[in-house]
Image (cartoon, rainbow, N blue to C red):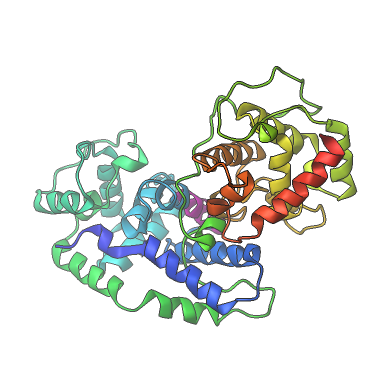
Amino acid sequence: MKSTEGASILTPADIHHIRTFIDDKYPDKPQSEKSEIVADAIRRIINQHLPDFAETVKKELTSRLVRKKLLGSVGTVHTGHIFEACLDLDIRDQRIVRPLRNWVERKLDVSVEDREFQRVLRLVNSNDQQKEQQTPLDAVARELNAPVTVTTEPQASSSLEKRDTASLLSGMPSTRILLSAVFAILLLGGLLVYIWSLVHKSNGADTMPIVSASPLEKQAAAGGKSQAFGAPDKNAAAAATATEPEKKATPTFKNELPKSLQYSDIQYEELKAFLESRSSMLAEPKYMNAIIKAARHYNIDPLLLFAITGQEQSFVPEDHDRAKEMANNPFNVYYSWQSFNTTIEESSMIAAKTVVNLSKNRPEDQDPINWINRKYAEDENWSVGVNDILDMLEDIAA
């Protein structure tokens, strides 16, 4: 029997093929635009594999699958992950249960009565037998070989990672044969052919290609998942105040940046005036303060972080159609602001930690920003742009 991993929707190899395809199709587009296309393609692939929920629900599921699976330790998204994510929804709501039941029936080519399906969902949510470490294949095999047990009253659902699609399958007839058939069907056809057909359905130059894949962003377009992005320090990501942050003692966080790129206080009002002259969303205290707080915590020159936002998103111009969303992640951490749309506090902390991580082990003869460039961006001239912007900001606000 094949494991649920045989029904992979996205793997690192798939993402590499998508990135290569987009690079070949749009050789003259700027890297930032190609990154947006890849991110959109990835979202669409996951979205098209989800049950027929409301769009708001599908959007949230897609983001969750990207964060917990594709960008997490798993590195892939498969059918079992989708079902697991659905279990975090309100399975008492018929607007959730009905589309989910239809989805399961299609995937397994079975017919399940509503009452029976809800019984199986309760069984899955109350099942605590998957605590020991085992591969998805082992879990599926064990569940399918076990007799069906009578469910009790539903208990509090376990965490997303403790659930497995196998629990659902255990109560369904002829599952062993059906599951093998489903895997065979899912493996038919080439992903690249699928992507090609979807891309060519795009209408007009302003429409993103309808390629299906999960949400990877800039680094996906630039060479796949990077280990440099670390989780932010939650204790350090305090909410920014509405005014200039109080100046504190120089941070003691140790990093390998040269002294010139370590934290020092900046001319806040001068920087704010410059950003306002650029009609930048980042001129608002909410954004400025969050970036400065992250810089102080990780002992990084705040102007370096602002220079990165200038290179990545031109300081987020207010007249951009999605400026407020872009301003949540002006560093394009976790591939792009479209795929990872979080808060400015979180993205600033991630960007700062990323700069610290990518600065390690730099040879003495290497420019520090060029050294960061190796993994932060595929564009070899990224460091040139960041250095130029940093020089300008230092003249204004250092």
223 falls in the magenta region: no
Answer with left or right where residue 293 lies relative to residue 197: right
Q: In the picture, which quadrant includes the N terminus?
A: bottom left
Residue 303 appears in the figure: yes
Relative depth, front residue between 162 and 260: 260
62 falls in the magenta region: yes
Q: Is residue 10 above or below residue 251?
A: below
Relative depth, front residue between 52 and 200: 200
Q: Position of residue 154 (x, y in %)?
A: 29, 37
The quarter of the displayed image where residue 33 is located: bottom right
Secondary structure mostly taken by the magenta-highlighted segment of the chain: helix
The magenta region covers: 55-64
Answer with left or right where residue 250 lies relative to residue 70: right
Q: Position of residue 256 (x, y in %)?
A: 56, 34
Relative depth, front residue between 225 and 165: 225
Relative depth, front residue between 386 and 28: 386
The residue under the point 73% across, 43% down is 306
Q: Is residue 229 above or below residue 79?
A: above
Residue 112 appears in the figure: no
Q: Is residue 47 above or below residue 395?
A: below
The residue under the point 48% across, 62% down is 47
